[in-house]
Amino acid sequence: MLKKRFGLIDFESPVIDFNYTDYYRSEFGSGLRRAFISFEKLIPADKISDIKIFTNKLEKKLSCKGKRNINIDPGYLDMAKLVLATTKDFAHRVYLGKGIYAEVTLAFQGNTFKHRDWTYPDYRTPAYIGIFNSIRKIYANQK
């Protein structure tokens, strides 16, 4: 469904254990796993709200008995940062409209991505940083 909407995948990470929080346990249970993908077709940054709304609808469509089977967290990456879209407001997030907020989760400094004070623990790990550095290299050749 994501490929139908966004086109060909140009990067797919290995599947990674997600054991950084119990936040999702009541909905998904234990043993969560995560993967990251990026798409060949670049999107304008101002489309991230519409994409988050689409992925929320997709999560709902794939739900069973009121519980999601998948959690999709869209974002975009450019040469300077990784931005994630969310429906949750906090002091460090900017409201984009339509119930969607944006957060600069990682910033590129020197020769790698660096976390912010508010960055979730999993996004601070060398594995995640490596993934986003790899995607950034692909992006650098596309723009």
Image (cartoon, grey):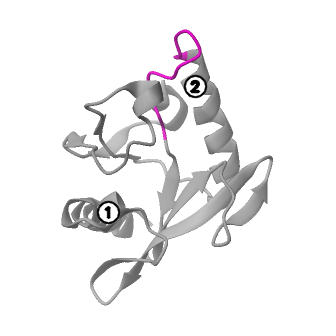
User: Judging from the image, what secondary structure is the residue with disc 2 in?
Assistant: helix
Residue 112: in sight, yes or no?
Answer: yes
* Residue at screen point 25% across, 63% down: 134
Position above or below: 53 against 126: above
Dot placed on the residue nearer the N-terminal end, 2 or 1: 2
Q: Position of residue 102 (x, y in %)?
A: 63, 61
Question: How many residues crowd around disc 2 within 10 Å: few (fewer than 14), some, or many (20 or more)?
Answer: some
> Which quadrant of the view contains residue 34?
top left
Q: Which residues are magenta?
A: 62-72
The prevailing secondary structure element of the residues shown in magenta is: loop
Q: What quarter of the picture does the C terminus occupy? A: bottom left
* Residue at screen point 36% across, 70% down: 140
- Please, what is the three-letter code of the amino acid marked with disc 2? Leu
Position above or below: 138 against 113: above
Q: Position of residue 62 (x, y in %)?
A: 52, 16
Q: Is residue 8 magenta?
A: no
Q: What residue would you read off at disc 1?
A: 132
Q: Is residue 67 magenta?
A: yes
Q: Position of residue 36 (x, y in %)?
A: 33, 46
Residue 70: in sight, yes or no?
Answer: no
Q: Which mark is residue 15?
A: none
Q: Of residues 92 and 133, which is closer to you in this image?
A: 92
Q: What residue would you read off at disc 2?
A: 58
- Please, what is the three-letter code of the amino acid marked with disc 1? Phe
